[in-house]
Image: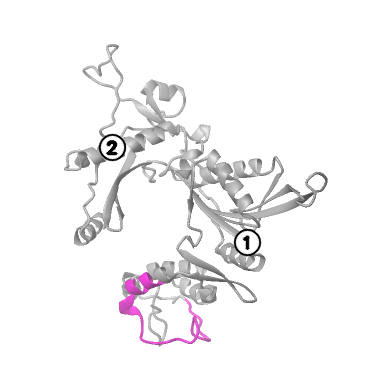
Amino acid sequence: MAHKTKRTKAIESGMKECPRTLDRAWRGDDALEWVQAADLEMDTLTEMGVFDHGYTKAQLIKEGICDFKTKKPINLSVCLDHKYTDGVLSRYKVRMAVAGHKYNLQKGVHYDEVFAPAPNQNTARLLAALTVAMGLKRKSWDIKLAYCWADMPKDQLLALQYPKGYERYEDDGLGLPGENPKPLYIVLRKNCYGVPNAGRIWSHHRDSWMMKHFNSDGWTCHKCTYDPTLFYITRNRITIDPKDVTKTRRPAKEEAWISIHTDDCDGFGTSDKILTDIYNAMNRQWKAKEVDSNFMLGVKRRFKIVPGGNECELTMTAYVAGMCEAFKDHIPDTNPSTPFPANKYLWRSKTPDPAETQEVLNLGYQRAIGMLLWAQRGVFPECAYGLNQLCRLMSAPTGMPGQQPCI
């Protein structure tokens, strides 16, 4: 149903419909473009060392990677997409990921824990306040194909089946597959999208490198306890007194705060130099691309200098407008004076009416709460209490005696 809806919307908006499989793509009018996009993805993952090719069944069993009983080769999921720039088709994109759903990979067999910390959104507001108070510099960047830079744990290597169109087979000694060809397999040597614990593997790899690299050669780095995705980095840099370059030198302490949301790095520092050096170090270790610091995770940040000090405005105008459009049929024509009605306390009914609960869920209650939570954590902390109340009814939203359902 989701695929059908997406295709319908694409056609209605004048965009080309994406084929769902490589087989269909390679038989269509844009076959050459799709072949090039798929080859680029396969070659990139191979060059990065993510895919290790050409393993036989016997080799997989010998290395303990796959026993073909409790552990079987996993399919590669292939996603095809069109990328548009200002409404014009700019490129064809193919993404290959591990089909890591619960029917293929089981916890305790293929992996253990999946938790990876995410930034606390209070951190973003705190860093904005520090920027205003201290006049900090800013720099933001993202890490390309972040997950794929981390090695897979040796006891969690996976065997993968080649996607259709890329199959490989054992030869018969003459370079031919033979009458009954035996398939070859890929070994996943590095982390990849689709692996259930991919986020955890990447965060351990990233944090270990950060702590090692930025605690040497004059750097010091501290990973914050309250928010383990925030790194406080300092450096003592020797500066020369311009009045007497031969005699006087003084150490200048530079400070930086780097908040990392998976692969999105948000940097704040006392100088452009320290931020540039941090960015360059991460770009050498992985591959990074600088992005606009005024936008981060849907939040627009506008800093400006005004008489008497600095100002920062955090907004999510486009996000809120989209949210209002999505639920425009349910927004009352009122102008509330508080984020949540005064003296209001919600609780779950002891005997909820299943029909009423389902009716409210069908209106999109859970989706609405999820969207509101993102906005509240980003720029509307005053809405925290009201959303706390609404979340109490997340599983069974229903009306209370003498009241309407809470959506």
Report how far apart the C-alphas of labels 1 and 2 lie in the structure: 44 Å
Q: Is residue 66 above or below residue 102?
A: above
Bounds of the magenta segment: 320-347
Residue at the (52%, 54%) spot, across then down? 140
**71 or 185: nearer the eye?**
185
Which circle, 1 or 2, is nearer the viewer? 1
**Residue highlighted by disc 2:** 36
**77 or 102: nearer the eye?**
77
Report the label total. Answer: 2
Identify which amino acid the numbered label 1 is placed on.
Answer: Leu
Evaluate if marks 1 and 2 touch, with contact meaning CB atoms under 8 Å apart: no
Identify which amino acid the numbered label 2 is placed on.
Answer: Gln
* Tag of residue 136: 1
Image coordinates for residue 218, horizontal then vertical, percent = 72, 43
Give the position of the C terminus as an image quadrant: bottom left
Residue at the (29%, 49%) spot, across then down? 90
SS label for mark 1 = loop
Assign the magenta stretch its main secondary structure: loop
Picture quadrant of residue 97: top left
Image coordinates for residue 91, horizontal then vertical, percent = 29, 47
Q: Is residue 333 above or below residue 127?
A: below
**Residue 197 in view in this figure:** no
